[in-house]
Image (cartoon, coloured by chain):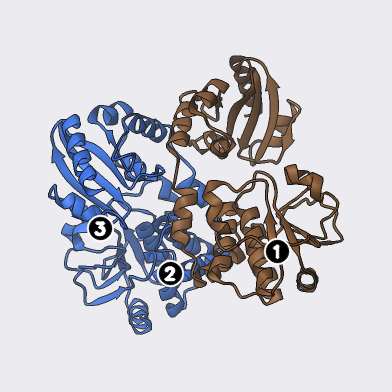
Chain colours: A blue, B brown
Amino acid sequence: MRETLRQAADFLLAHDHYDILTHAYPDGDTLGSGYALCAALRQFGKKARVITTALPRNFVFLAAGAEEQSFETETVVSVDVADEKLLGANKETYGGRIALCIDHHEINRVDAPLKCVDSCASSNCELLFLLFAEMGVQVTKPIATCLYTGIATDTGCFKYSNTSPRTLRTAADLLDCGVDAPAINKALFDTKSPQKLQLEQEIYSTLSYCADGRCAVAAATLDTQRRLGVGDDELEGIASLPRQIEGVEIGIILREKDPNVFKVSVRANERLVNAAQFCARFGGGGHAAAAGCQIRGSLDEVVHLLQTAAEECL
Amino acid sequence: MRETLRQAADFLLAHDHYDILTHAYPDGDTLGSGYALCAALRQFGKKARVITTALPRNFVFLAAGAEEQSFETETVVSVDVADEKLLGANKETYGGRIALCIDHHEINRVDAPLKCVDSCASSNCELLFLLFAEMGVQVTKPIATCLYTGIATDTGCFKYSNTSPRTLRTAADLLDCGVDAPAINKALFDTKSPQKLQLEQEIYSTLSYCADGRCAVAAATLDTQRRLGVGDDELEGIASLPRQIEGVEIGIILREKDPNVFKVSVRANERLVNAAQFCARFGGGGHAAAAGCQIRGSLDEVVHLLQTAAEECL
């Protein structure tokens, strides 16, 4: 890994005029990575900008120091992008042009001449912290703020199994750089919009259990989504709700995409049930703990189908 | 602090036959501290036991290694106890007998010949980690599990402002000792009993806003508490719910203790409103960010009283 980091550092120091690509539906890790790298490159007098399909309201603070620069793109770098498909609307412009790919996903399909991928890193920002040390970047408070946000986002504030001792030590070093972690944590993890709260209420009101309470299913119908005016932002995160209930080993959320077409998100205790295999029954897939599929039918029919499958598994 | 740690370490190594006192309504920090210290003392061939008013179901795993020992008490140590009053039912037996008080609260009122208090520590368990180094304790997996649980409990899994760089580095060292942190985090932070979920639903259904959405008030009536059969365990933590709503600067929860007697918990953005001063209007007190009071009246009356006060403050 050290060798790879050195190569990536040399590359970044040798080139200029950077477009830094983030993935579509950007989260704190890809945006934190983008704005941190942008600021780091500018420390060396280079021109750089972040290319993103969106900058969600709650992440605007990451872009605070990155005033616009105009220049002709020479070098394209991607951060936290596992596959060019995930560039979304930017794929057309940037597909095939990535010179350096920096990522932490276990499977990375980006075809680039230079790749710096560390799947042991909790987050792309944890990897960037190592890369910055190799480059001799001064980790200022704005850079540390970006990196901390990425790490906190991907680890659920150090809750998930991707949190390693190195992750925690990196976060400690970032706090030493002056990050206002409590404010970031409050905004990311302890703040709900009244809409999101209402959405959760409505979803919980549809909750039904089966298999002696070991499976729970809930739904966000089109009607609910329209009435509350909630978008993808608010719908993020709801997939984990049913699995949080004590005793639930398979938690299922249905999200009606079109009339009688449901996007199904399954979260499972992978020691008991493989969520990917469960979803494969319905033509879907994913990971052992989190997977998805799509099913057509009325809400009652789809719930019944999933509950029958869950009872067979448990 | 180093000097104090050395004195406490010498004391613990020099004495024997320990009763280790935890505070009433025990949480992960006092219990984690108790069982960690018990295991540490036994490493040196000493007799020790933990004295607690209760061992909540979700913390039973902390006591896993502590088989019963019978002996005459010689030495009494308290952990995470800020005041003898907080010993609850054990105050009668142990009041005035504490030989060593180990604590991390800013204000500690325990009268003991030897006190080891570090208010810079996020948690009592963070302080114990330093003390164990001074004693030469081998931090085994069970001890690390207890210490990690205490730190995670008191910092909200590293979310709150008491999380210092040292806190994160201590947690990293504990992970190195083999703690199954993801399982502990899931149990502590991502698990809700169906009852607790129902309780939250009912509380949210009573939510009312004032001061342009900057104050939110919700209530758990006696009727709700009885119908759901919820106790103090489930009612823990609900105080923070309204303040989590975006835009809310004062979040208030009313808990009906007796008919028309409400325990009021106030959580505030202390940069705008001092919760302690707010509660002082009603004869209560506390901290700038979290305070409480008690008010008599019908639910409607009490809500109206609080909302009027909130509108004056904001």
Query: Which chain is disc 1 placed on?
Result: B
Disc 3 to disc 2, how far (Cα)?
A: 34 Å
Q: Secondary structure at mark 1?
A: strand
Residue B31 position, x and y percent, is 63, 54
The foreground one among A284 and B287 is: A284
Disc 3 to disc 1, how far (Cα)?
A: 46 Å
Q: Are marks 3 and 2 in contact (CB under 8 Å)?
A: no
Asked which quadrant contains residue B192, the reply is: top left
- Determine which residue is flagged by label 3: A287
The foreground one among B74 and A73 is: B74
- Tell me the amino acid under the disc marked 1: Ala
- Determine which residue is flagged by label 1: B48
Q: Is residue A314 left or right of residue B250?
A: left
- Determine which residue is flagged by label 2: A40
Q: Secondary structure at mark 3?
A: loop
Residue under the point 37% across and 57% down: A31
